[in-house]
Image: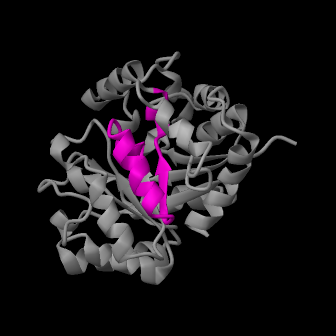
Amino acid sequence: MPTPIIDMRSRPAFLHPFFGADPGAPEDGVVRWLNRRVGAREIGHDTRGRTVEGCTAEMGAAGIAVAVMVARSVPGVRVRNDDLAAVAQRDPERLIGIASVDPVELGREEALAEARRAVADLGLRGINLDAGFYADPMRADDERLMPLYELCQSLGVPAFIMSGPTTPDLRFNDPLAVDRVAKTFPKLPIVCCHGFYPHVDAMVTVAFRNENVFVSPDMYTFAPGGRLYVEVANGFMRDQFLFGSSFPFRPMRQGVEDFHALGLSDEVLEQIPRCLRQVCG
């Protein structure tokens, strides 16, 4: 029986114009541009995922059993946690929502209150932090984020950290900052979305040192230099490696097909659903 595919980074296109909700919006051009840059073979595939039913149909066609929907809350891309929770509730067996807060916009206490509400009241399963994308960008170990990590650890939910080559100021795309967070909160599962690409060597070093760090390189697994993620996944990182389609910035089916062609061992593929349980409970 095939191992179920768990998609650790997916966003329904209808949640925001930046994900492709409005074909006429300027943000839709970004969706197309990024699809081309990361090697999508079908530009415009996201048009089939502009409803909950369309999104889950795409999942089924790609063989994806569960999708983890990671929200965003940064200038220009605000996805309300209430809206994400409503989507997750439409198909709770297959859709998992990860909340997002902006501590720069909200301030410390309000950000903590919103994160707590998103988990305790809305049933979302983790908190996403876009450290380098806030109006006042920061490293992942910025002191303003530490109370949010502490809250995640106390609530027993993971922290997702957004990273990668689209960080507005690349100085903040630094995986070494995650090392301090992991050491400070050793019981906190930390998911590094986009794997802090292109700093692959530093990212896998941080994962080597910290078993509570999970690497989800997503679409950058297939970018130049991404083979190192695969090499270490077949070694020490077998239980810290996650698959993410990055939908709508890459087609779900292509993501799954390309993933299966990476040469990952059966042990790694079987471990990925277990990683979901480790991360999201």
Is 221 in the magenta?
A: yes
Q: Residue at x 60, y 46 (%)?
A: 235
Q: Is residue 126 above or below residue 41?
A: below
Q: Which residues are magenta?
A: 193-222
Secondary structure mostly taken by the magenta-highlighted segment of the chain: helix
Of residue 140 and residue 166, the one placed in the foreground of this image is 140
Q: Quadrant of residue 134?
A: bottom left
The total of numbered circles placed on residues is: 0
* Residue 236 on image: x %, y %: 58, 52
**Left or right: 100, with 188 as reference point:** left
x and y percentages locating residue 21 in the rendered image: 41, 36
Q: Is residue 162 magenta-colored?
A: no
Residue 246 visible in the snapshot: no
Above or below residue 28? Residue 197 is below
Give residue 145's position: percent from left, percent from top: 25, 69
On screen, residue 110 above or below 177: below
Give the quarter of the image for residue 261: top right
